[in-house]
Image: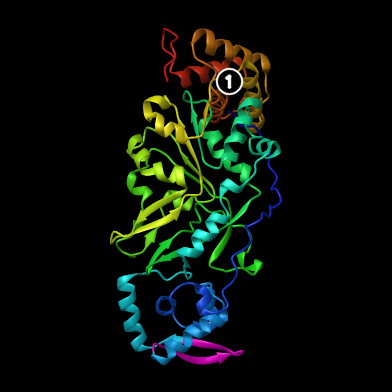
């Protein structure tokens, strides 16, 4: 519920059955995508990037050199590209005038010119193999994941049990009790796991971009594993959406300019954690989400629509966290709550926990911790302000102290005067000594 100054060391990667790297295709037939699609992609890359060696083109497409060499034969036969020289037995290639005309036509239909996508069949197979439902979480994993938070043993056990379900969890309770911190820390339990994420997926000639460097944390050099370079080795993803969530964000996003798709939040979160923070406060109504995700939560599959109306079946292999300060019973009906396997109420902290959190926050802020000062603060919050002890208060109060000291150009100190000023600013106390949030 509160933060400490604990530094987590990077655990060694785990190797699990069924998590083998996707094998590198050695021929066009093994790529799993139509040859014509790959030829078009190579032509667009040559147009956009300019002349390059065949080896550079292979790297751009993330395909085996021999595979791209096969593509070159067809492109040369149709006079769409030409060999301009040989350096170290590696052909240098450039697009021809007819090739430019063809590339412009292709780019008008679809501007994707990145790594070759994987087939939908390959994507489904790999995602199923890497499912969070197959991950076993044990007490040491939970202790490591939540080492920076102050949580009681009972709550930790519930979190560990929920993660082993591989499905979903409902975190609820008053504001400021640490629900968001707990939710974002859940993925730490998977920190030693690695999964393969494709750059893109091809469906009926359409491209769905999946890999997102803002979401997927790449680990090392994927190609060093001798794997299919169209896949990126990453930590299990951790995707957070809040009040900005709309029903459109749960569907394929077709860019009207580039004319290829971006994967929705739940597809980017596959094999990892999707956090819906402040659930119930989105522009998307809770019942809309209920209707949208009844089947995915039950059966582990999601249906996404292409622009032409075609439905695509996508794996829904992720751990979903709903965090809210609203009463769950007022948000969704009993049928939806049943589908969320674990519900955990995150409430006010005890005196001891409040001290633990305050001590950790002071350590981070390089303040001298004073137990007597914190005792007085606890009494003020509970007796005078009639407020529960929220996990957010230590950090918020210390921040007020630091900001005031910065303004006055002095070193921050945890003393009675500083805490008094911080409390008055934070709780907006009036003449009646009433706390307002």
On screen, residue 377 above or below 253 = above
Residue 177 screen position, x and y as percent: 52, 25
Q: Which residue is mark 1?
A: 349
Name the side, left or right, on which 228 lies relative to 326.
Answer: right
Question: Residue at horizontal 56%, vertical 82%?
Answer: 66
On screen, residue 338 above or below 256 = above
Report if residue 351 is visible in the image: yes
Q: Nearer the viewer, residue 8 or 38?
A: 38
Name the side, left or right, on which 249 lies relative to 168.
Answer: left
Question: Residue at horizontal 44%, vertical 27%?
Answer: 325
> How dense is the environment of label 1, judged by Cα within 10 Å: few (below 14), some, or many (20 and up)?
many
Disc 1, SS? loop
Residue 118 screen position, x and y as percent: 48, 67
On screen, residue 197 above or below 229 = above
On screen, residue 425 above or below 50 = above
- Magenta stretch, overall SS: strand
Residue 204 image-quadrant placement? bottom left
Residue 411 screen position, x and y as percent: 62, 28
Name the side, left or right, on which 11 lies relative to 284.
Answer: right
* Image quarter hosting the C terminus: top left
Q: Magenta stretch containing residue 20, yes or no?
A: no
Q: Nearer the viewer, residue 211 or 433?
A: 211
Report if residue 152 is visible in the image: no
Please report the bounds of the magenta region as a residue range: 80-93
Residue 428 screen position, x and y as percent: 43, 18
Q: How many marks?
A: 1
Question: Residue at horizontal 67%, vertical 19%?
Answer: 370
Q: Nearer the viewer, residue 330 or 381?
A: 330
Question: Residue at horizontal 50%, vertical 8%?
Answer: 384
* Image quarter hosting the N terminus: top right
């Amino acid at each position: 519920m509160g933060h400490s100054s604990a530094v987590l060391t990077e655990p060694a990667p785990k190797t699990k059955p069924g998590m083998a790297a996707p094998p590198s295709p050695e021929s066009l037939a093994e790529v799993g995508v139509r040859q014509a699609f790959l030829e078009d992609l190579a032509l667009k890359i040559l147009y956009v990037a300019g002349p390059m060696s065949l080896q550079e083109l292979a790297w751009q497409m993330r395909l085996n050199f021999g595979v791209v060499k096969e593509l070159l034969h067809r492109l040369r036969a149709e006079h769409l590209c030409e060999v301009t020289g040989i350096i170290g037995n590696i052909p240098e290639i450039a697009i021809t005038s007819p090739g430019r005309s063809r590339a412009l036509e292709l780019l008008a239909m679809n501007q994707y010119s990145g790594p070759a996508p994987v087939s939908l069949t390959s994507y489904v197979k790999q995602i199923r193999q890497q499912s969070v439902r197959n991950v076993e979480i044990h007490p040491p994993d939970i202790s490591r994941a939540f080492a920076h938070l102050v949580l009681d043993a009972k709550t930790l056990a519930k979190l560990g049990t929920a993660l082993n379900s591989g499905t979903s969890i409902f975190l609820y309770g008053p504001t400021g009790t640490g629900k968001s911190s707990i939710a974002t820390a859940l993925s730490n339990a998977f920190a030693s796991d690695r999964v393969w994420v494709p750059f893109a997926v091809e469906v009926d000639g359409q491209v769905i971009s999946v890999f997102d460097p803002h979401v997927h944390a790449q680990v090392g050099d994927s190609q060093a594993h001798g794997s299919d370079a169209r896949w990126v080795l990453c930590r299990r993803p951790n995707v957070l959406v809040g009040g900005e969530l709309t029903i459109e964000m749960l569907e394929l996003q077709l860019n009207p300019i580039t004319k290829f798709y971006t994967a929705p939040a739940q597809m980017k979160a596959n094999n990892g954690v999707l956090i819906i923070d402040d659930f119930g406060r989105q522009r998307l109504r809770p019942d809309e989400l209920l209707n949208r995700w009844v089947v995915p939560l039950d059966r582990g599959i999601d249906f996404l629509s292409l622009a032409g109306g075609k439905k695509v079946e996508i794996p829904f292999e992720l751990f979903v966290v709903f965090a809210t300060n609203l009463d769950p019973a007022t948000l969704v009906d009993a049928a939806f709550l049943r589908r969320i396997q674990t519900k955990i109420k995150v409430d006010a902290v005890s005196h001891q926990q409040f001290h633990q959190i305050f001590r950790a926050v002071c350590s981070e802020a390089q303040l001298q911790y004073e137990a007597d000062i914190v005792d007085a603060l606890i009494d003020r919050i509970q007796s005078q302000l009639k407020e529960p002890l929220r996990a957010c208060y230590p950090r918020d109060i210390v921040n007020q102290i630091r900001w005031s000291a910065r303004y006055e150009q002095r070193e921050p100190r945890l003393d009675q005067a500083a805490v008094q000023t911080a409390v008055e600013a934070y709780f907006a106390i009036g003449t009646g000594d009433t706390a307002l949030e």
